[in-house]
Amino acid sequence: MRVRSLEFGQRAQEAVLDQQLQRNLQRIGVRFKVGRDMAFAALEDPEGLRNLGRAIKERSLANLPHLLETLEAKVKEAGGTVHWACNAKEACRIVCDLAKQRAVRTVVKGKSMVTEEIGLNQALEAEGIEVWETDLGEFIIQLAGEPPSHIIGPAVHKSKEQIAELFAEKLGSPKAQAPEELTKIAREKLREKFVKADMGITGANAAVAETGSIVLLENEGNIRLSVTAPRIHVALMGIEKVIPTLEDLAVILALLPRSATGQKLSSYTSIITGPRREAELDGPEEFHLILLDNGRSRILADPDRRQSLYCLRCGSCLNVCPVYRKVGGHSYGWVYSGPIGAVLTPQLVPARLARQLPFASTLCGACAEVCPVKIELPKLLLTMRQRLTEDPNFDGGIPLLVRLAARFHGWLLTHPRLYRLAMDGARAASRVLVRDGRWLWLPPPLSQWARNRHIPTPARPFSSTWPKLKKELVQGGEGA
Amino acid sequence: MKVALFVPCIVQDFQPQVAQATARILARAGVSVHYPKGQTCCGQLQYKSGNWKSARAVARHFMEVFQDCEAVVAPSGSCVNMVRKYYPELFRDEALWMDRALELGKRVFELTEFLVGVAKVEDLGARWRARAVYHDSCQVYRALGIHKEPRALLSRVKDLELVEMEQADVCCGFGGSFSLQFPAVSEAMVADKVAHILATGAELLISAEISCLMNIGGYLLKQGHRVQAVHIAEVLAHGGE
């Protein structure tokens, strides 16, 4: 998918002015955040569960090569095929080759962020293959020709009225308003595709190494149809999704739906091990698992950034992020949005193209409070800021002038006398610009700040008033 | 007990009355206040803008200035969090400085946590007749876990009626350089915060974090709302003897 993260500032500005979008984003809090908090409050030891989840991800990643090889062996044992893909291009090529070799004409897809990451739909369509998203949210944004705006609710930025209009325009349906009606229209459309499809493509919420299984969570049942109706099932997953055992899975299953939607368990949880066996009634004839790196091993190699890979893709950090809730997912300009997107994007795409994202946060810490595996998102955001500013391997393209200004300011702060002189000089100079405690003129970006906010003017510094105050405190018998 | 006053850079040159109030309160709490020379800033801006080399230099300077102090108190949660949580991060590869940072971190306190937790004083004899709402800054509440202390102190202020606002724990949108880099988003966030403040009918907005006050107070002032934004130190030092 094309990276448009450099447009963050502009898109964010448009987003805050888009009243319809603001109303749609408001709903996220009600829909997800409240449910999440209730689901965790009902647990006996929510902290303990989160610690356990984090420990599992930590252990899995420390052991990743071994786990992936075990997974591969077990998938083969179960009759499946495993493919390794270095990058997006390679992953797309593997899927397209499979489709062409097996004369696939129609593909149905379950919701998968990783296929958005590699731009799989476009690659298949370029080969003349028909691709249908079967998750309702994905179906909606596919019709609209948009990327997802949320990890869990791809179409969360649209109201039901907007969806009704879209359906009327693209599917020629009557302008129905009720969500039930709209769902029915989508369902009818997709049923024929399920029957027709030769290949089902899904992501994976997790993979269990000991059994060679992939795990898929959903609420609509479309994934079940996608993986059982067509003759071929292809699952794609990032290499960081593998965990050792079914016992570990129990912990992930307790955390993920609670964090994502506030559910104890999703309506459907599928644990899939290989293709259809002899004498089984349904399931695909072939099962393929594609393990995708696409920059993940580089993240793994850096201890300071490794925890970016713990992410379960639950979306809870988006739901509580005050910045995400103002700017929406599309402002982030790529697949992953919100705090985790701000951390992941500059690591998965050329850093320069996403250099603004780690700075697009107030570091308020709400994300770290809800993350099911306790990813220290503020710390990661700070780390990415440092990398983009100081690490040549992460060329953030931050202007030299900006960096020199920061350095000069830092240097001044270690020379108290000079710093005092500079501040006193600035205060003297500012008198020209201040009338009645207000600034007559300010340079950008202060001028934008001051458009709707008063900026304080320099006062007589505390240090010069201290000697007198100190005397007063001593005379008042209040110690000094 | 001897307490060193740490005056954050914004307070020093833009809000000196907050440092004056802090000194008065500490004296009233029965500790001896002194003001170490040569202090400038904690280096938060350098650190948060990704300039860690500069941040380290500023942090070293800070540690030198305050090295012999029994306790250091600042009217700012973000600066205390910087010293306590981020200095050790900054000096991960420099054992000596790391030890110094950890050591100093134990002796640096945010004003309200020092008053309630160390000096064991809640009633400072202050009086302010107003309906007030307290804003939990992310840096004070979420980062440092300070939530009860300011309320305990404010509940002892005579004639002050303290009310709570909706979504009190949501960020006001300042975020330092964030508000300069993305002014429109920051402004939309502060507008939400102000709507919640106005809904309480409070005439006074109180916070323990100077940067939030600059943001929220600056918005209140420019929009002509009749809510006064004050630092908790100014309230605690007010009208009492």
Image (cartoon, grey):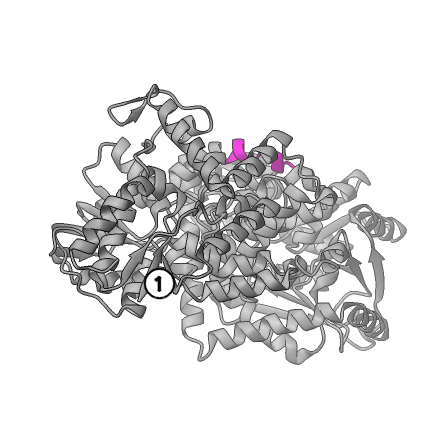
Q: Is residue A436 magenta?
A: no
Q: Position of residue A303 (x, y in %)?
A: 69, 61
Who's the residue at 53% across and 57% down the image? B87
Give the overall secondary structure of the magenta segment: helix
Q: Position of residue A169 (x, y in %)?
A: 54, 34
Q: Position of residue A88 (x, y in %)?
A: 78, 48
Who's the residue at 35% across and 42% down the image? B12
Q: Which residues are magenta?
A: A3-12
Q: How many marks?
A: 1
| Residue B42 showing in the rendered view | yes
In the shown orientation, is residue B188 left or right of residue A318?
A: left
The residue wearing badge 1 is: B146
Q: Quadrant of the N terminus of chain A?
A: top right
Instruction: Note whether A240 is above or below A109 in the view shown.
Output: below
Q: Quadrant of residue A273?
A: bottom right
Instruction: Note whether A243 is above or below A339 in the view shown.
Output: below
Q: Chain of mark 1?
A: B
Give the class, few, some or many, for how many residues have Cα within 10 Å of label 1's Cα (few <14, many ≥20).
many
| Residue A188 showing in the rendered view | no
